[in-house]
Amino acid sequence: MNSLFEKVVHPQDSVLQFVTQYEYIMDIRAERENVEACKGEISDPPLRASYDFEKQAANFYTRNVFSKFQELLHDSTKFRMIDIAEDDESLSIRIVHPNSSRVRIVSVSKDATSYLCSCNMFARDGLLCPHILKVFTNRDVQEIPDKYLHRRWSKRQQQRFQNISQVLNHPLEFQVQTS
Ligand SMILES: [Zn+2]
């Protein structure tokens, strides 16, 4: 930090220049912290269960959202599938929790591309609920269909926002004198 100051701030600079340069230094520091945060994001988060779809989620979601996904996956182990009804188009799977009388119903299309749960968590939060994840593990689903990987929670989308905010945060750059 000090060496950065010595490089950019000169004794003859006016107070205004000093303030401008101080802001610039703060921007550089914020950017460095951003880069550090990104490094953490890039390293692989630990998998709890090693399902293929868990690896897929680890690659897709930001670190924070993936932690939430892992919690939901862990919660899913507490549920039990009690029966499956079948019609021409879908399976309806009833799911219960040992400590609750509430029954959730997961509907799975026959081609296994659509999963709907009566809890509606995906519509609300954009993340698959523990009931659908229970069906995934029970039926040995390997891959989360694309439509259930919400772009809002993706690493790629987060990177885009960071790039935009970095551009917007550096309007002062052209004013800086370097010796
Ligand atoms: Zn659900």
Image (spheres, grey):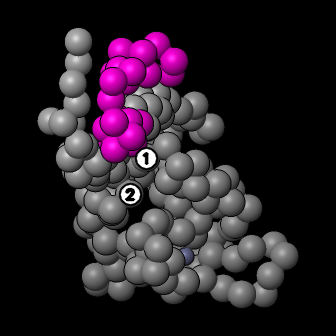
Residue type at the position of mark 1: Thr
Q: Which sits in the foreground, 129 or 173?
A: 173
Determine which of the numbered discs, if any, sits on residue 62 in the image. 1
**Residue at left offset 41%, top offset 80%:** 123
Where is residue 31, by image quadrant? Answer: top left
Residue 126 visible in the shown view: yes
Q: Please tell me whether the stretch drawn in magenta is mainly helix, strand or loop.
A: helix
Residue type at the position of mark 2: Trp
| Gap between marks 2 and 1 measured at Cα | 6 Å
Residue assigned mark 2: 153
Q: From the viewer's perspective, is 41 left or right of 163?
A: right
Q: Magenta span covers which residues?
A: 1-24
Establish if 51 lies above or below 73: above
Establish if 170 lies above or below 110: above
Q: Estimate the x, y position of residue 172 in percent, counting from the top left.
A: 23, 42
Looking at mark 2, is its residue's CB closer than 8 Å to ligand 1? Answer: no
Mark found first going from the N terminus, 2 or 1: 1
Q: Estimate the x, y position of residue 144 in percent, counting from the top left.
A: 36, 54
Quick one: SS at disc 1?
Answer: loop
Residue 160 visible in the shown view: no
Q: Estimate the x, y position of residue 161 in percent, counting from the top left.
A: 28, 52
Quadrant observed for ligand 1 in the rendered image: bottom right
Q: Which sits in the foreground, 28 or 66?
A: 28
Instruction: Look at the image and tell me in which quarter the C terminus lies.
Output: top left
Local packing at callout 2 (Cα closer than 10 Å; few below 14, some 14-19, many 20+) is: some
Q: Is residue 87 magenta?
A: no
Contact, CB < 8 Å: mark 2 with mark 1?
yes
Q: From the viewer's perspective, is 99 left or right of 41?
A: right
Where is residue 23, by image quadrant? Answer: top left
**Residue at left offset 84%, top offset 76%:** 99
